[in-house]
Image: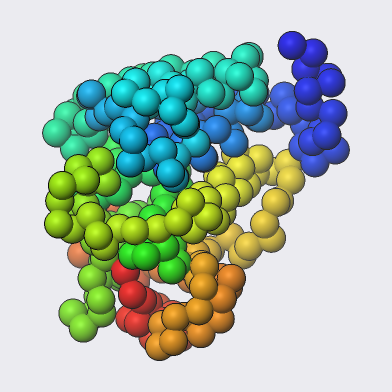
Amino acid sequence: MNEAEYFKRVNQIFRPESLQKKTAVVVGTGSGGARVASDLGRLGVGLTLLDRPGELLEEHNIVRHMLGYDSLGKPKTAELARHIHNYNPNTPVECVDLDVTTSQPDFHRLVESVRPDLILACTDNQPSKHAINQAAVHLGIPVVGAGVYDGGIAGEVYITRPGAACYGCIAAELQLKDTAPKKHLNIDYNNIDLDEIRSTAALNGDISQIALIHTRVALNILLAGEVDLLGLPPEVNLIVFANRRVPGHFERPLHGEFFHIKSHPDCLACGSPIHNMNAEAESILASLPV
């Protein structure tokens, strides 16, 4: 591989060696996580790919996944590593079979040993996001996570940093009002027999849109101090992006809203004092169809 030639089209944006020194743990290699991992991996970020033991690519995954029929029935993590190495064979990639929810102490030890610059939360349920959050808060590691809303109408990308609001604070704010439509975060996308699976429908383009924002935010954190790829105010820790117009919820298509959620006073994870949202943010979040 000729790295000078490989990076020719991007080295005026950032120094390739900057990202080659960075590492990230990617938790979840589904349709969203695979895209984030692929984009970071081709730029040289060292990756640890985590997914649950026995997580194989199934046929119903393929319509929305980076991987295709040549990976059918094979482990997602290993096949994603192969996919990344097809673009950048020099990227270090480690694959780990681990359920972060049922094996939380093992996840904590893994993150402690790897000491990544960033954790990417790409899972589809609340318990795993909170398990990731616990380790990140304790070890002082930033997290960028994302989720796609029912029907692919929109999605969210959240950012947690040491000393600031953690995922527990953000989740509490999102669920603050009992009248707000609830998020279906406990759905197992890989169990096609679940009746609930109908509520998780989303097009490949819907997922890709949110994954691209997820990736850009991750790159911005990894390149902090060298280049700003976003221009977001540093206090922004939640982005809600509407893929399309939904009257009563999202009046503008292809539009992002940006929020600063402060630490929740009763958060058991970060225990930080005092939080408050402005009235506009509270009103928008209260109406989200998720």
Q: Residue at x 47, y 31 (%)?
A: 67
Examine the rendered structure and indicate whether residue 283 appears above or below residue 148.
below
Q: Residue at x 66, y 40 (%)?
A: 223
The quarter of the picture where the C terminus appears is bottom left
Q: Residue at x 42, y 63 (%)?
A: 152
Examine the rendered structure and indicate whether residue 220 appears above or below residue 285.
above
Q: Residue furthest top?
A: 1
Depth check, front residue: 1 or 92: 1
Whole-percent x, y for residue 9 in the image: 83, 34
Depth check, front residue: 105 or 191: 191
Q: Give the side of residue 45 with respect to residue 175, left or right.
A: right
Q: Give the side of residue 214 with respect to residue 183, left or right.
A: right
Depth check, front residue: 49 or 104: 49
- In which image quadrant can residue 41 be found? top right
- In which image quadrant can residue 266 be found? bottom left
Examine the rendered structure and indicate whether residue 168 appears above or below residue 189.
below
Q: Is residue 112 visible?
A: no
User: How is the rendered protein coloured?
Assistant: rainbow
Whole-percent x, y for residue 55 in the image: 27, 28
Depth check, front residue: 3 or 218: 3
Examine the rendered structure and indicate whether residue 70 appears above or below residue 25.
above
The quarter of the picture where the N terminus appears is top right
Q: Residue at x 71, y 51 (%)?
A: 228
Q: Give the side of residue 52 with respect to residue 121, left or right.
A: left
Whole-percent x, y for residue 252 in the image: 56, 81
- In which image quadrant can residue 73 be found? top left
Whole-percent x, y for residue 2 in the image: 79, 13
Q: Is residue 235 visible?
A: yes
Q: How many marks?
A: 0
